[in-house]
Image: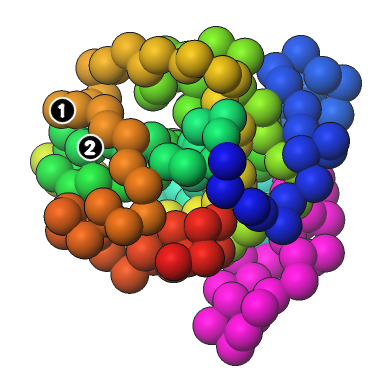
Amino acid sequence: MAEHPFDLSTAARLGDPWLAPTEDLARAFHLLDHYEPADATQEDFQRRMLALIERHPHDAHRRTLLEGHLTASALVVDARFERALLTHHKKLGRWLQLGGHCDGDANLARVALREATEESGIPDLAVLPVPIDLDIHAIPARGAEPEHFHYDTRFLVIAPPGAIEVLSDESHALRWLASHELGSLSADASLRRLFQLVFGA
């Protein structure tokens, strides 16, 4: 089992009280305001995400906000901390961590866990409450939807022992990868950064 710096005793599952959904964006603002950025880039992402909520205190977490909106994602790791589960996303055509839109839920940790559960098909996942990374990235125009930005808060999610993934309609494929295997994919810089944060390689 790989060594890691994370306190897994803080992990929670869907149904735990602090993972209750809420529409109140004060919850997301508080979480992001207390995030401790590791570098200037993370500090800039934090500032821009807080500014988005301040500009749009009622709908920053809704996909109807066309300039961009909050999202949440999860790097799902196996119980032995040796591999992470990635999805080959149908709409974007890229290998990514699991995640998606808030759809009005301002509890970002819950959104990450909900999306990870839906996209992986794995029950009893557990999320750590503190974000491990922030990222802002452009989403290309598609159909009537204009190009916009995702203001993404990333969490670490732990799979139970013996977890078996089930492909959802959102994915071409799901794949467990160790950090040394990431080079076999066309992974972008933000995904490589997540692997570095979690696996140290």
Q: In the visual, does 119 lie left or right of 104? A: left
Which stretch did the figure color magenta?
Answer: 25-51
Q: Amino acid type of disc 2?
A: His
Quarter of the view holding residue 195: bottom left
The residue drawn where x is 36% and y is 47% is 178
* Spot occupied by residue 84 in the image (x, y as percentages of width and height): 42, 41
| Mark 1 / mark 2, whichever is N-terminal | 2
Assess whether residue 152 is covered by the magenta stretch: no
| Residue at 83%, 64% in the rendered image | 34
Q: Residue furthest bottom?
A: 40
Q: Nearer the viewer, residue 43 or 192?
A: 192
Res 166 quadrant in image: top left
Query: Where in the figure is residue 33, as x and y percent of width and height?
Result: 79, 65
Q: Which residue is mark 1?
A: 172
Q: Are marks 1 and 2 in contact (CB under 8 Å)?
A: yes
Question: Is most of the magenta stretch helix, strand or loop?
Answer: helix
**What's the amino acid at mark 1?**
His
The Cα atoms of the two marked residues, 1 and 2, are separated by 6 Å
Residues 13 and 106: in front is 13
Residue 50 within the segment the image draws in magenta? yes
